[in-house]
Amino acid sequence: MLSYYFFLGVRSLRRNPALTALMVLTLAIGVAASVSTLTILHVMSGDPIPHKSARLFAPIIDNGPKEGYVPGEKPHDHQLSYRDVVSFLASGQGERRTGLYRIGVVIEPTRVDLGVISAEGVAATKDFFAMFDLPFLYGQAWRELDDKNGGDVVVLSRKTSEKIFGLANPVGQRIHMLNGDFQVVGVLDKWVQRPRFYAYNGRSAAFNTEEEFLIPLSSAIRHETTHEGSMSCSGDRGAGWQALLDSECTWLHFWFELKSETQRVDLQNYIDNYVAEQRKLGRYKREEKNRLFNVREWLTEMHIIGDDSKLSAWLAFGFLLLCLVNTIGLLLAKFSVRASEVGVRRALGASRRQIFMQFLIETSVIGVVGALVGVVLAFGALALIGMQSKHLAVVAHMDWSMLGLTFILSVSAAMLAGLLPTWRACQVTPAIQLKSQ
């Protein structure tokens, strides 16, 4: 019976193609607008490392000056000084630890036909690879000895490796950068963290493409490699690289990985005791609470999802609601002219339930067609959004879950819009309709 109702629904749509096309287009536009906006919000708000996000923690310590301090005011700086990063690395806390900062370099390949290549990457410690689950295509991470001695080694992204060495395995080869020769010890397979929470430097940077290279933190420090991003300094930091390392300037990030999220209390106690000891030595003038953030909390703290994104989503759903209202009006007009048909069917013994099912399945057919058109329009809308900026191009893409949501939303919206017209159609009195014929 359902297949028969579906067949009747298809035939009904063909009776008035102009009205049908208007209903489908109205529904498709509303679905495309809401889904394209929701897709971007979905990518931006997704958990970048769900299986361990509750075990990764970033510490925040307020090392600002006493002047201008307002007790209870949250610090705006979410980075750490080099002195604190070194102490945390040596603390032994957690299963893994990594300190890092973003850098930019100019790579001079041995092939003269390539010329120099500008690349952006990360200076980190060896634990970075296991902590954030970086996959390797060739080779492996550098040794702990390289972390200790500041070895001139580098791990390339697959894209960077193919740009310099082609499809060959480059492990053991050397590239010239930072006024020295760095040996390639590994090549990453495709790896993109979205958002790039581990070294957050603004919303646009959080959704950039993959890292192009990684080198040991100690090597970057030894080469006096300046950072890419913001820096906050209280007072005069002095002149020279060593003065920067000894200062209270904050420009690095740090992450702990715990074996279990229940160890969070122990890590918090360690951070509090560390700050108390440093305060006795004359550091940390403010009596501010030290904070720990897991990945999800960190994304919230960094405002990865801004109020503007949420507002856009609400506006998109408001537009969908407006399209549904218009669809309801069109369905009322369509079903009202079929009152005589309903009267005849009721007189021949069809129940109100059967009439209701017939008309509801007919609106579902409209939803399926609207879903197909809506998917096409949504892809087009995302393509246009992606053309606006580089970081929007990264997030403006639809995955399978959002594609499924498009169909569910379209069919559900059509059925919801069809409830009132279908109910009105079921109220037709057979005797009145038969007398009028």
Image (cartoon, rainbow, N blue to C red):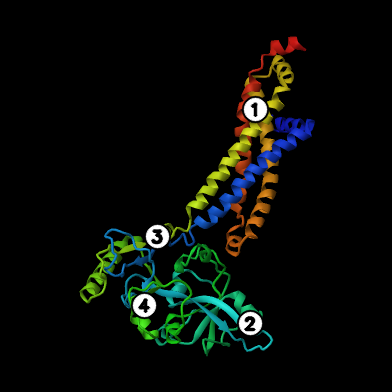
Q: CA distance from mark 1 to mark 3?
A: 47 Å
Residue under label 4, please give it: 82
Q: Which residue is found at the position 74% from the left and 12% from the top?
A: 434
> Of circles 3 and 2, which is in front?
2
Q: Amino acid at mark 2?
A: Ile
Percent x, y of residue 56: 40, 65
Q: CA distance from mark 3 to mark 2?
A: 38 Å
Label 3 residue SS: loop
Residue under label 2, please give it: 164
Q: CA distance from mark 4 to mark 3?
A: 26 Å
Label 1 residue SS: helix
Mark 4 crowd level (few <14, some 14–19, many ≥20, 10 Å Cα): many
| N-term mark: 4 or 3 | 3
Q: Which mark is residue 383?
A: none
Q: Amino acid at mark 4?
A: Tyr
| N-term mark: 1 or 4 | 4
> Which quadrant of the structure image shows residue 118?
bottom right
Does residue 137 appear anywhere in the picture?
A: no
Q: Which mark is residue 54?
A: 3
User: Disc 1, disc 3: CB below 8 Å?
Assistant: no
Q: CA distance from mark 1 to mark 4?
A: 69 Å
Q: Amino acid at mark 3?
A: Ala
User: Disc 4, disc 2: CB below 8 Å?
Assistant: no
Label 2 residue SS: helix
Image height of 238 relative to 325, above or below: below
